[in-house]
Amino acid sequence: MKKEKKEKTKQPYSYFSNLRFICAAQWKFRKSYLFAAAAAAPMASVSSVLAAFLPKVVLDCIERHVSPAELLWRVGVLSLCAVLLVAAENLLNTYCDTSMIIAADSFWRMQITDKIMDMDYHIFTRKGTRSKREKAMNSLMRSGPDGFIRINIHLFSALFGFSAFTTIIVRCSFWFIPALIAGYALSMLGWKALQKFRDKLKDEEARIRLRMDYISQRSKDFAEAKDIRVYEMQPMLDRKAEQALEKRVSLLHRIHTGHMLNTLLEDVLTLAVTIGAYAYLIHLKLHTDMTLGDFALYLGAITGFGSWLTRLADAFSESLECAHSVGDYRSFLDIPDERKRTGEALPTGDALPCAIEFDHVTFAYEDAEKPTIRDFSLTIRPGEHVAIVGDNGAGKTTLVKLLCGLLAPDSGHIRVGGRDVQAYGRDDYFTLFATVLQTVNFLPATVAKNVALCPEEEIDRDRLWDCFRKANIDEKIASLPNKENTLMVKDIHEGATAFSGGEQQRLLLARALYKDAPILVLDEPTAALDPIAENDLYMQYNTFAADKTSIYISHRLSSTRFCDRVVLLADGTAAEVGSHDELMRAGGAYAELFRLQSRYYEKEANAQ
Amino acid sequence: MKNLRANLRVQLRGLRLNQQINGKWYTPFNILAFYLPVLANYITIHFSGSVITALTEGRSFWACFRYVLISAGLVFAVFLVRRFIMRATMDMNWTAWYRREMYMTRKALSLDFAQTENPEISAMLGKAENNSQTYNGLAHQPILIRSIAVSLLSVVTATGMSSGMLTARGDTSQGGVLQWVNSPLFAALFVLFVVLLILLSVWGNDARSKHRFEGHQLLGKLHMVRRYYERRVLNESGSGEDIRLFRERPLIAEELENGISAVSRRAAAINLRAGSTFGMITAVVTAVIGGAVYLFVGLKALSGAFGPGKVVEYYGVMTAMISAFSDLALQLGMMRSNRRFLEEDLAFFDLHSEMKNGTRSVEGIDPQNVEFAFHDVSFRYPGSEPLVLDHLNLTIRTGERLAVVGRNGSGKSTMIKLLCRLYDPTEGSITVNGVDIREFDYAEYLKLFGVVFQDFTLLSFTVAENVAASETYDEDKVMRCLDTAGVGERVRRMPKGVRQCVTKLYEEDGEDLSGGEAQKVAIARALYKDAPFVILDEPTAALDPKSEAEIYARFNDMTGGRTAVYISHRMSSCRFCDRIAVFADGKVVEQGTHASLLGENGAYAALWNAQAQHYTQ
């Protein structure tokens, strides 16, 4: 009832195919859970039926004036059964609960994680994939795949209890069943109306929630701490939070009024059923030979029937909801990849370093109005060092992603080592590149693992330190208490070391050097470095890029001086290509840009 | 005993804090809203007993049915009250999370900047946040108090209703077992049996809740690791490229296995052990007592102590009482284990700003004549060894444009933090026109600056609110500042102009700004303050050459006649400043004009040449 109505999309999976999928996977992961769940199924309903019969037995005994021994015997046996059932039920439920959590954390979630890391990059970054991934993640939050077996057990158990109680009531009078169901349906109408009302307010509710979340996150995530304090924005934040809260309270009050009216309606209906049941049963008791025990049994069954109805209806809607969650989960896992996993052998030996050829490459992101890369052609000779420059948004990073095989051109070809990129196996091809990209997200693991990016035992320590030295971060690492085994990411590990922006860039460089691949790609690797560190990198560049084909992207036009050739990217196409000197002589856009940046450095420069 | 008192003290402080957060009616309303249905249940039980008694006495239909009507009337009255109270309670409960969040937000905002950079304090906040998310500590306390109070009330009510059960005596002339059933000894034994079982269940629940804390701590860590991976590594803005290009999949799988799966299995093992042993105790105890009660009242009824009506009533009352007892045991155990979470929360809420605030106002200071001076200032970050600033001496004079350059880690940005009093010097002092800055009222002191930090941030509110740093603003002035910063046209093109929100995080129709545009809005914010002093820290690091050139060209307009400090790794910026201070190892090692410093051929020349050589032919 409380469940929010979701925009349901049609899914290709039937309820039973979902059940089969979940059971098969669970069978592979951990069989015992399936057995425990099956055993737990009838327990809850059997023990509540037992509880309904207990008062009848006692009352009958008293009415018939049985001997104390007989009372002891009858009540004793029933109670013992109840105790055993309760014990078994408890044990099985605890076991099922823990199994569910283990499966959720160690199995179901890992499948998603693995898919995220393994699927084709261009598919992963598509908008449609994003929403599918979010839905799959949400399905885990709502106990979709891990809870599906459980919910089916609940459904079964509710069905059993419902039938048992129906059987008891029918023995007394059939007419109570339709009356009870009608009452239930009436109250459901009330809840449906409330749900409709809530749906109407949903957008506004979400908006308010978004705002509250934003304010509380900003205030507690200390990234904004400086600006907030120096500009004294605390009162503004506080007032905005207050306003959002007020709105939420008034919204909730309306919903809760609806809730109150509904529950009052339910109260009245419940009381009406109870009064009716009493009237009928008192009448029967007075005019037939019904025993007191039966009186209590029927009374309990009729007044308890409502809760079974609710349980059954809830379990039914929850199981549908859950099946939908499972469908969301499977939809993500079932997204097909497009790139081939195996292909031609990579260039080795004499074929290294490799040549790179862009042949009329065009690429547009989905929903983009115009292509980011437009008819781009460029041939990079084996071992050549190329600098790519251009404005923010000119398409430099996209070009790199195309080259590395993360994205595929819409038209045109990219050839590496003479073969079309698509001819190579996807993951093999990645081994050709060592990159320093702009997004930095270190893993909450040791420095060594973050640089070598392989499991502990495979790390080559000598090579690691060699790369630290080349990237000029060796002294810093040596000064840390645990050296290269120091943990990173302070949010996760207390006592982890925080590296400055410049140090992070050096670590990324060390990582690229450790990989030692034939093609080196650096995207803005010096933005956070001081002039001397920047210069050091320039000076060393030719050493660590020796025998490699390399691409260097930067806003700092100085970087073009140690590259063989410069490509000025404008609007996704190669506006100018040539060596620095050639381009300067040509006096085009590059020369203009270079003058813009260099004029302050010239000896007789006028500062204004 | 001492432990108990300490626990009580923590609980009371938590209760007080909760009352501050949620208002004084929060707890009483909650208790009432949840006790009333319990009361209604007892009413129903009592009158169903009466009906059966009337039936066994062979009374007429109406004599029996009368009780049904009385019961229904009473129950309806109770429900009516309950539903109204419930609505108010739900209003409070459904916003409790937000109120707590707001309270925490306020606390976080009240901390000094130095505190926000203190890892210990971040950890405290992290724990308090985690507790709030997982409903522990402060968040859990009201629910525990409510349940305990309701259980206690329920036990009291039940005791009152069932007192007759023990004392009622039947026909004492019968022989054998039935006579013994009526003896006080039998009643005493029965009570002892029940009490022992209840104690067993209390013990079991207590032991269980201890395990629960253990498991919970493991899970807290697990959630943290998972959140990090899911938000920073595994989503679209994470490391998708790196994961593929560097084949991080096996490594990450291994890390997740160790950091999540293994921890989850350990926590599950603890819960399984605790649940299957201690949890079962409660369930079994409840079932055993249920059987015992039936035997007891059944035997007494057989002996004629009371009729079947009372059997039904006593059984109903006792069942409710036992469930109240086992609930009570469970909640008390939880309350004890919740103490540790509560202490974590209280530790955070006990934090207070440590900055000593002065009283002086800046009114006496002539904006045309402001001179800042660092006198032998040394500084080390709290809890760390090396000096970041080492006997720094620097004077910033009115109207001048000062460029600050130096290598990474030479103390440039730290100097700015000290100047803004985000930290106080470890040694030495900073003065304004000869007055120690610690003597000023902080809010007053801040009026002297407009700062654009290296890692500046805009909030997702409207452009105008960002520029004015307030909800009230002078729209013309906002526009003027935006124009001066060079982003006026861009803002005018927005559908709502200065009322357009920045990014879509707060308002769905917000507009995203590029890095350069955001930087200019941040500059406009610094200008809006009309402060005599403007500080720009690395404003062009992320900009392409065109945007960089634009900022340089506008630098004079932007700063006007103000005193300006410009920090940058782009040495070119030194050309339009009057004076340059070169930082190295926390000191100013060289000062002068571009020409004079180049002539000295020292640290400045080294920095300059490192960059300039690539630009000069």
Image (tube, rainbow, N blue to C red):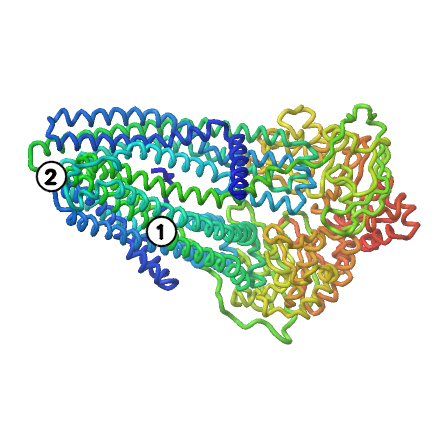
Residue that mark 2 sits on: A291
In the rendered structure, which amino acid carries the disc numbered 2? Answer: Thr
Q: Quadrant of the N terminus of chain A?
A: top left
Q: Position of residue A178 (x, y in %)?
A: 17, 36
**Residue A227 tag number:** none
Residue that mark 1 sits on: B281
Label 1 close to label 2 by CB (< 8 Å): no
- In the rendered view, tell whether residue A155 sits above or below residue B495: below
Whole-number angstrom distance, CA of label 1 to CA of label 2: 36 Å
Q: Position of residue B26 (x, y in %)?
A: 46, 29
Q: Is residue B538 visible?
A: yes
Could you tell me which residue is drawn at 10 percent across and 34 percent down? A285
Q: Position of residue B476 (x, y in %)?
A: 68, 24
Circle 1 marks a residue in which chain? Answer: B
Asked which secondary structure carries label 1, the reply is helix
Near-viewer residue (A239 or B513): A239
Query: Horizontally, is B388 left or right of A322 in the view?
Result: right
Q: Position of residue B158 (x, y in %)?
A: 31, 34
Circle 2 crowding by C-alpha within 10 Å: few under 14, some 14–19, many from 20: some
Could you tell me which residue is drawn at 83 percent across and 47 percent down? B390
Near-viewer residue (B524 or B135): B135
Work out whether disc 1 and disc 2 sit on a shared chain. Answer: no
